Each structure stands twice: as structure tokens, then as C-alpha cells.
Amino acid sequence: MTRIRASCPDCGEVDLRPEQVVLQLVRADDGDVTDGSTYRFSCPDCDGVVEKPADERIAQLLATGGVEVEEAGPILPPHPELLPGGPALTHDDLLDFHLALQADDWFDELLTSGLR
């Protein structure tokens, strides 16, 4: 039976069976495994969930060892509202924007406001 040796940050090295590990792959357009690919398992000693990055070599070893493979979609950038540098869009902001768009000169107002 295949045994997989991994490490838990709390317990150290642990031995796992393939069915205890899940490999999640993110692929580039050319099919190669890219950043964002991970493998995860529940530590048999402490029951903590451990997730670690998986490069091409690790992904190949785990997949050929019988680990379940999940194909993930592309990693999306964070939502613009979550980026630092400005306040989040509020309901009042959205209502103000909606009302501004009702005016015939909304585009001229935008150009003169300096918000380009």
C-alpha cells in the first residue's frame, strides 16, 4: 500500500494514505502546473487541516501515488473593492452614481470632476 510522508506544522512528519490527501491543480494555458496548486490533508494526529503548495514534481508524485486530483479554475485577482487605497463602494455611492447617470451631461461632469 502506498504511504505518503508529509509534515504537519504542529505534529511534524506524518504518514498518510492516498485517500487522505487531495491535490488541487491550477494549470497554465500550456497545461503545466502553476502557482496556486496545493495539496491538503487532515493530520491524523491532531486533526488539523494542513495545506501546502504543490509544484510540478510534487503534483506528479502525488497523482501517480493515487491521490485524488481536483482541477481548479484559474486564480482570479482579488475583487477591486478589496484592494487597498480607497474606501469600499457603499450603497449611497451606488445610488449617487445611478442618479448622476440620469443626467444628459453626466459624461461632461465626469470629465470636469478629475475622476479619470
Image: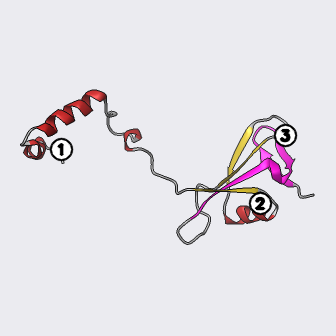
Kindly report the distance in space between the C-alpha atoms of the residues bearing marks 1 and 3.
55 Å
Q: Residue furthest bottom?
A: 30
Amino acid under disc 3: Pro
Residue nearest the viewer, comparing 84 with 59: 59
Task: Tell me, for residue 62, which label it has, or none.
Answer: 2
Q: Secondary structure at mark 2?
A: helix
Which residue is the extreme one toward the top? Answer: 92
- Label 3–label 2 contact, CB within 8 A: no
The three-letter code of the residue at mark 1 reads Leu
Within 10 Å of the Cα at label 1, are there few (<14), some (14-19), or many (20+) other Cα atoms? Answer: few
**Residue 109: % across, % down:** 9, 42
Classify mark 3: helix, strand or loop: loop
Q: Which residue is mark 3?
A: 44
**Which SS type dominates the magenta stretch?**
strand
Do callouts 2 and 1 mark residues in contact (Cβ within 8 Å)?
Answer: no
Q: Is residue 12 magenta?
A: yes
- Image: 34 above or below 38: below
The amino acid type found where label 2 is placed reads Leu
- Residue at point 81% right, 60% down? 66
Question: In the rendered structure, which segment of residues is drawn in magenta?
Answer: 4-27
Mark 2 or 1: in front is 2
Dot label at residue 115: 1
Nearer to us in this view, 61 or 72: 72
Marks 2 and 1, the one that precedes in the sequence = 2
Decide if residue 99 is on the left or right side of residue 45: left
Residue 84, disc:
none
